[in-house]
Amino acid sequence: MRRLLALLTMVGAAMLLLEVSPGTAKGDPSPAAQASADQNLAIIVNQTNTIDDITLKELRTVFLGERSHWPNGRRITLVMMDPGVPERKAILRDICRMNETEFSRHFLQGLFTGEVFVSPKTLSSPTGVRKFVFNVPGAIGYVRASDVDGTVKVIRINGHGVDDPEYPLRFEARDSK
Amino acid sequence: MSEASHNAKASRSAFQRLLQAASSQIARHSSSLLLFMVFCVVIAVGMFMIGDLHTATDQAQRMYAGSVQGLRQIGELQYEAQETRRSTLYALTTNDSNLQVEYADQSRKADGLVTEGIAQYLAGAHIPREMELGQRLQRDWAAYLKVRDEVLASILEGSTKEAVDMDLTGGVPSFDRVRQDLEEVKRLYDEQASEQLKAVGLSSRRSVLRLVGVLCFTLLFAIASVWVIQRSKMLSALKLAKMQMDFVASVSHELRTPLAVICASAQNIADGVVDEKEKLAKYGSVIGHHSRQLTELVNQILLFASTHEGRHRYALRPLQASAIIESVLTNTRELAEEAGFTVEKSIESNLPPVMGDFSAICQCLQNLVLNAVKYGGSHPSIAIRAFRGGENVPYGEEVRISVEDHGIGIDGSELQQIFEPFYRSPVVKAAQIHGTGLGLPLAKSIAEAMGGRISVVSKVGVGSRFTLHLPASQVVGAENAAERVAQL
């Protein structure tokens, strides 16, 4: 029994050693970090949009419909994915800090009181979101980082790009459950 | 210097002989040549017709392919332009953002095809009007797309009223301009296609006219050629018939004279008019002489007939020119003396032997000597010379034996004809000089059978010199040392 415990301890130690690799240095993301970047959520806008960086706070006002126009004067159009989609869950949790019911209620109430200027457009696929953003100059949406292509522009959040470890929007595995 | 001059003269002489041979061959094969020319002309005309038809077909195919391609291009442009607008308008009919995005996507795909089609049209534009039209279409299409993008954005944003207003104020007029441009492109294409059709029709008519012209020419040429061939053959047949008639008359005359003498002599003997031994001997001699003359004549005719039909065989062997000349002079001495001719003989020393049939060559040379006596005129002298010929002959060294007289001579225009069978010059006919017209053709046939030839130089009133050219035996002998049998 002791021998078995000792063997298991050695195997565990070897696995820990393998986890530590030179790729963990700053600027050279490890496969784990790369996998993490793939799970980040990219905030995308139209290529003509002049905005490059946005704070998480500003992003919250945008996603809650409390801000109506971009600095260039274009009207903001919010694009969301269907309820229940992991990406939407992550946005509601990390940006809006609401659940689905609270989010719906917020928009119903806001539209009624006039505090919210426009209701979000709902699309069923990341491709649809991307194409919508491509077609509408004032649109803003989100897709997984791996779904981004050259037709749209990815903006930084709090100065962090989607590949940065400090990037605040993370699409976690449990969201997809 | 003299050697160079001799060489130049020999070259000229060889060239003249070549020319004569060529013209003789051409004259002999004129019908075949004419037929060959007709064949060549027909082939050339056929090739021309095939080429012309090919060009016309190619042109028509190009026009057809161009028409189909152009029509398809314009049709596609019109369809895709409509599709661009139709998809945009479909997006207006729904509130489902997913569908709206799909329609927007369809509209963008269609507009990409239109943009590409316009670029292709511009790339293929050749005339200024096409380029101007293409550039205008490109501008108008870009203007419409700008409005379309705004309309699509408004639709997707959910501002349907704004999108409709924008489309009515900007989209409809700009799309109408595009439609007009496309109609103008189509009209221009129709004009170009009708011009091309007209050009093809014109080319086709020209082609038909050319073909008719060429066929007429070929037909006329063929008719003319056949007429010439027929006429030539008819004239040849007439000439031959006339010569044969002349020959029969001449032979009859030649036969009748000795026969008359023989008959008269025989009758006198039979009637007992001649009873003295000396007179009998004289009569016998006369009968014998004329009988030999008859035999000679008949032999000559038979010899000519056999050589002419190509069934005479010669036994060739090396011969000395001196032996030939001696034999000929012996045979003709009596005749020459009777006619009062003196014969001057000159034989170059160390002459190489010649290859030939002795009796045939003697017959050949004898004919030349007899002609010299017959046509010697008022200057009864004959010169026979044997000498070495030049080496610039086709078969190497040769020996020449010339027979020269100072008689009536031959006109230059008759020099070729005198070697034709049965030909007798009008001058000698008028001068009542008897003959068969076979002596020279026979001599020529024999000379050629020996691998040689006969040349003649003559001037009217001055005399003639016939030269028998025979190849030296070492050349021929090297090829065949033993006696060989040549068949004519």
Image: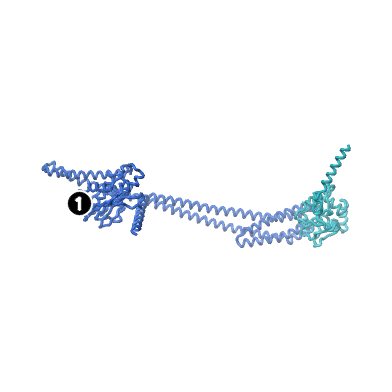
Chain colours: A cyan, B blue
Asked if residue A116 shows in the view, the reply is no
Of residues B60 and B244, which is closer to you in this image? B244
Q: Point out the image quarter for the N terminus of chain B.
A: bottom left
Of residues B242 and B284, which is closer to you in this image? B284
Residue that lies at the very extreme toward the left in this rendered image: B276
Of residues B273 and B464, which is closer to you in this image? B464
The quadrant where residue B172 appears? bottom right
Of residues B391 and B235, which is closer to you in this image? B391
- Is residue B203 rendered to the left or right of residue B409? right
- Is residue B179 rendered to the left or right of residue A59? left
> From the viewer's perspective, is residue B6 above or below residue B475?
below
Judging by the rendered image, the residue that carries numbered circle 1 is B339
Asked if residue A96 shows in the view, the reply is yes
Q: Point out the image quarter for the C terminus of chain B.
A: top left
Q: Position of residue B182 (x, y in %)?
A: 65, 58
> From the viewer's perspective, is residue A165 above or below residue A6?
below
> From the viewer's perspective, is residue A169 above or below residue B311?
below
Q: Position of residue B397 (x, y in %)?
A: 34, 50
- Tag 1: residue type? Ala
- Is residue B159 rendered to the left or right of residue B437? right
Q: Position of residue B442 (x, y in %)?
A: 29, 47
The quadrant where residue B184 appears? bottom right
- Is residue B2 rendered to the left or right of residue A174? left
The numbered mark 1 sits on a residue in which chain?
A: B
**How many other residues sit within 10 Å of disc 1, few (<14), some (14-19) or many (≥20)?**
few
